[in-house]
Amino acid sequence: MEDVLGVYKRTYDETHPLICMDESSKQHIDEVRQPIAAKPGTVEKYDTEYERNGVSNMFMFFNPLEGKRHVEVTDQRTAVDWAQQIKDLVDVKYPHAKRITLVMDNLNTHTGASLYKAFVPEEARRILDRLEIHYTPKHGSWLNMAEIELSILSRQCLDQRIPDQDTLKKEIAAWQEKRNALAQPMEWRFTNEDARIKLKKLYPTLKE
């Protein structure tokens, strides 16, 4: 925990960007009957019956100091899928960064081994050398600011029936463009000092 909180206290450095990464999924729900559009004095009406139409995965990459985020929608969330996203992060989104500080949870696919599954050893090593990885602790995913962004995405964009992946991509792209236009850095106020007081029970008790 203190490792991640220490990272969050660092000052902005465009050559060493801070990126928080997380994943989520969205089940596609298709209507079986045409909804009745809202009219003056009435709300939209839709049938409680629906049809499941698959699930898409979402990779969230959030730069809290710049207030920028990028969401990539994929069919799956395998080790190779994650590795491809990390390569894109390094080579496309931040090609000029000397090193990227990457904060994420301990999901079994979020490891250097996944890069070696997807690429030849030289390429996997090259990508890893561009990363400084910090993991949130077990049961501490709330420390990942990308999880907060996913929660905002869910409330502002995904709280509706989305029938297919193409629609999901369009909805997320519109939300992402609007949020990125604000470019509002996230204000993270919880520090190691706060943790030592508020989460004192998580620290070992040393006998004098």
Image (cartoon, helix red, strand yellow):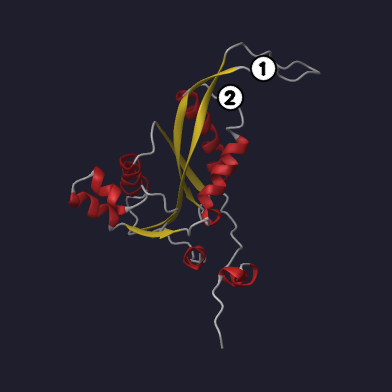
Asked if labels 2 and 1 touch by Cβ distance under 8 angstroms, the answer is: yes
In the displayed structure, does residue 74 sit left or right of residue 49?
A: left
User: Badge 1 local density, few (<14 within 10 Å), some, or many (20+)?
Assistant: some
The number of numbered discs placed on residues in the rendered structure image is 2
Residue that label 1 marks: 46
Amino acid tagged 2: Arg
In the displayed structure, does residue 90 sit left or right of residue 49?
A: left
The percent position of residue 28, horizontal first and vertical second, equals 51, 25
Residue extending farthest top: 33
Instruction: Give the camera-side residue of 65 and 77.
Output: 77
Amino acid tagged 1: Tyr
The percent position of residue 17, horizontal first and vertical second, equals 42, 57
Residue that label 2 marks: 161
Residue plotted at (51% across, 63% down)? 8
The percent position of residue 124, horizontal first and vertical second, equals 24, 51
Residue extending farthest front: 207
Residue 81 vertical position relative to residue 64 in the rendered view, above or below: above
Instruction: Give the camera-side residue of 176 and 198.
Output: 198
In the displayed structure, does residue 178 sit left or right of residue 122?
A: right
Residue plotted at (57% across, 48% down)? 148
Q: Disc 1 or 2, which lies upstream in sequence?
A: 1
Residue 76 visible in the snapshot: yes
Please tell me in which quadrant of the rendered image residue 102 appears. Answer: bottom left
Q: Secondary structure at mark 1?
A: loop
Residue 48 vertical position relative to residue 101 in the rendered view, above or below: above
Residue plotted at (78% across, 18% down)? 42
Q: Quadrant of the C terminus?
A: bottom right
Alpha-carbon distance for marks 1 and 2? 10 Å
Residue 190 vertical position relative to residue 164 in the rendered view, above or below: below
Q: Secondary structure at mark 2?
A: loop
